[in-house]
Amino acid sequence: MTEDDIRKNAFAMPMHNPAYPPGPYRFVDREYLIITYRTDPKLLEALIPAPLKLAEPVVKYEFINMPDSTGFGHYCESGQVIPVTLDGVAGSYVHSMYLNDHPPIAAGRELWGFPKKLGEPELRVHKDTLMGTLDYSDFRVATGTMGFKHKALDVTSVAKSMGAPNFLLKIIPHVDGTARICELVQYSLTDISVKGAWSGPGALDLRDHALAPVADLPVLEVLSTVHIVADLTLPLGTVAFDYLGKR
């Protein structure tokens, strides 16, 4: 294998058998349980990376089931997203994510900089309740519940909100342990088709854990709970800010 062969064919690791295929990535029947809650604004200010700015002192805790996704198969995800602005434009900063499938963990971290770790999330309907859970090292760290399909929402408005910008802090280390890549990545979901959206009564319980610190952003008040089923595409991203160079 020549140097030119490597430059031509290198995409992801391992080179001879990448953990995931090239994107973009299509998701069918992607299902969300999103619980928006109020938390301590000082805690949020301390962890949101500049030049992003805090939009409001709330967190969106998400449980997501992805039964049909390009190259990734069927997996679940759970984590926290924070409303922010960049140059006055509203969006969301993805703060934490826990998944139960290796390919989307590898792709998410390497391509966009998603803050993904291995965990055991689940989203399912239990009788009259939509229930999301997250276990980390055999310990329950998050439980979210919602009354199943109590009130239908306008799918057009929901689709528009899902297309807003998202921001990620991507860090790739050099071989000496210093940061070789340190940048703010921006992406927006595309080709969104919302098949259904509902609201209902909701509750969220977060537990302390040293390695899955979701409870570090405590629940002061649950503000809203939404259940969404949609098809969508996750495209590749762009660099919004380069911490090691020029914007």
Image (tube, rainbow, N blue to C red):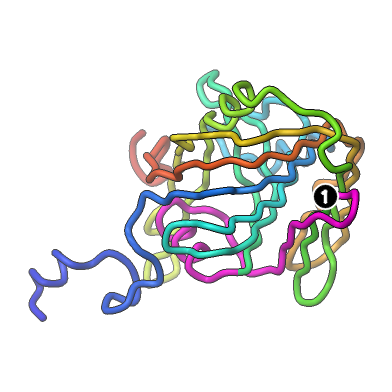
Q: Which residue is mark 1?
A: 130
Horizontal arrangement in the rendering, residue 221 relative to residue 71 (left or right): right
Residue at 44% x, 35% y: name it: 191
Q: What quarter of the picture does the N terminus occupy?
A: bottom left
Residue at coordinates 49% horizontally, 57% vertically from top-left?
Answer: 69
The stretch in magenta equals 101-129
Q: Residue at x 86, y 61 (%)?
A: 208
Q: Amino acid at mark 1?
A: Leu
Is label 1 in a helix, a strand or a loop? strand
Q: Is residue 114 magenta?
A: yes
| Residue 107 among those drawn in magenta | yes
Q: Position of residue 217 (x, y in %)?
A: 80, 46
Q: Nearer the viewer, residue 81 or 35?
A: 35
Depth check, front residue: 53 or 140: 140
In this rendering, the answer to whether 77 lies above or below 92 is below
Q: Quadrant of the image for the C terminus?
A: top left
Q: Which quarter of the figure has residue 211?
A: bottom right
Q: In the rendered image of this protein, does residue 83 appear above or below residue 96?
A: above
Relative to 197, 28 lies left or right: left
Q: What percent of the width, then of the height, locates residue 14?
A: 34, 77
